[in-house]
Amino acid sequence: MNQGINGVSVVLNADQDIKSTIKELRKSVRSFDYEFIVIDKGTAERHWLSQQGDTQLVTLRDNRDLQGLIHRMARYNDKLYLDDGEWKYEYEPVNIPAINGPKETVSMPKLPEGTRILHVSSFPANTTGITEALRVFGTVETFDWLKEKNATNVQEMNEALKWAAISFRPDIIFMEECFTGEVFPDTIKHIKSLLKVGAINWCGDIRAHIPASMITMAEAVDWTLISNQPQAEQLQKMGFNSAHLHSGAPIWLYKPMPPDKERFPEDIIFLGSGGRNYPLSPLRKEMCESLYRRYGDKFAVYGRGWRKKSYPYAKQFIEVKDEAIAYSSCKVAIGISAFDWENYTSARMWKAMASGALYLPYYFSGIEKMFVQQGHLAWWKRIPELHTFIDYYLAREKEREKI
């Protein structure tokens, strides 16, 4: 490969060896900025691919313009295509054009009382807070598209969604279709052609690049909401109505609870995954190592992807129903998201603070507009600064409890 390239989009077909292919390629491209764009024609590795921070997944179906789609979603003008075992290089010097021209900027409307909302969710058990929040505006019906798909197939699930909309006759469709592309844009377009209905797609999670499925879905919905500022602005430049909307936490689930020191005896905890290849993953591990060296058994990590052999401070994954108890049992809760982007924080922040924990998050641009430093929380920019805050608040219970 050309070592003079500053950044490259590597386009691959998702064959049976896609996992090993990506792992090997990472060794070759790690000296410069890169991304993988994987074309999925029905791979069994779809879940694994969707979890990789350096990979975008394109689900190929219908008569999609694959080349145009790759050009729209690629971050870099330099592209390498792996085709039948041979590399093909391409450079596109022009800027990416906006899709269908820019749309007129309009304000998000206020919903009238009695609005009927169809909540299209793939994980209702994890998004009950969203469902309950939507009930503020009126009547809500939930469509579990993942459950429906698993019971039938993708095509029949999309047909079932059409009938659910026709039967319920919503005023608004609020959906969370971030990564899979299995709710078809044509399904939403068909519903909108039959009913006078608005459609919103929101993603509270984040990847290094806007998933291809969100871009194609943006052509069908009225608004695309996303939990970080840069990608919302990127979608706007593509010509879509897009806005920033944070994630959140249901306050009926995340609230101060009686401490359970038998299950959660540590003073300092971090609830989050390890082992993934995200931009802040190295700093996350470095932070955890430093906290264990400094505080020993007073510190623990609860989450997936931490091998006990390598990380002696790692504990079991905590179910959603127990997270508030864990936060209520500690003295200090640490936060560091997977990405360092403007106005982006994971739901960890809202969960910890709603549960009454003193929260010490890694700084992100925009946090100072939302919170008062050492009034609502205490953010840090370097690990020694984190140590200073922990030492300070562990020694000052009244100040800690006040925050």
Image (cartoon, rainbow, N blue to C red):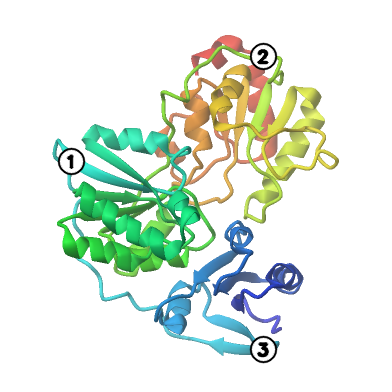
Name the foreground residue: 295 vs 59: 59
Type of amino acid at the residue the image marks with label 1: Thr
Q: Are marks 2 and 3 in contact (CB under 8 Å)?
A: no
The earlier-in-sequence mark between 2 and 3 is 3
Q: Name the residue under label 2.
A: 395
In the orientation shown, which residue stands out farthest toward the front? 152
Compared to residue 369, the image places residue 91 above or below, namely below
Dot 1 falls on a residue whose secondary structure is: strand
Q: How many marks?
A: 3
Tell me the tag on residue 115: 1
Where does the image place residue 185, in percent across and percent down from the top left?
A: 34, 66
Look at the image and tell me in which quarter the N terminus lies.
bottom right
Q: Which numbered mark, 2 or 3, is in the foreground of this view?
A: 3
Along the horizontal axis of the image, is 119 left or right of 389? left
Q: Are marks 1 and 3 in contact (CB under 8 Å)?
A: no
Residue 361 figure quarter: top right
Type of amino acid at the residue the image marks with label 3: Asp
Tell me the tag on residue 84: 3
Tell me the tag on residue 166: none
Q: How far apart are marks 2 and 3 (CA)?
A: 63 Å
Dot 3 falls on a residue whose secondary structure is: loop
Name the foreground residue: 39 vs 244: 39
In the orientation shown, which residue stands out farthest toward the right? 309
Compared to residue 196, the image places residue 1 above or below, namely below
Q: Distance between the residues labelled 1 and 2?
A: 51 Å
Along the horizontal axis of the image, is 140 left or right of 87? left
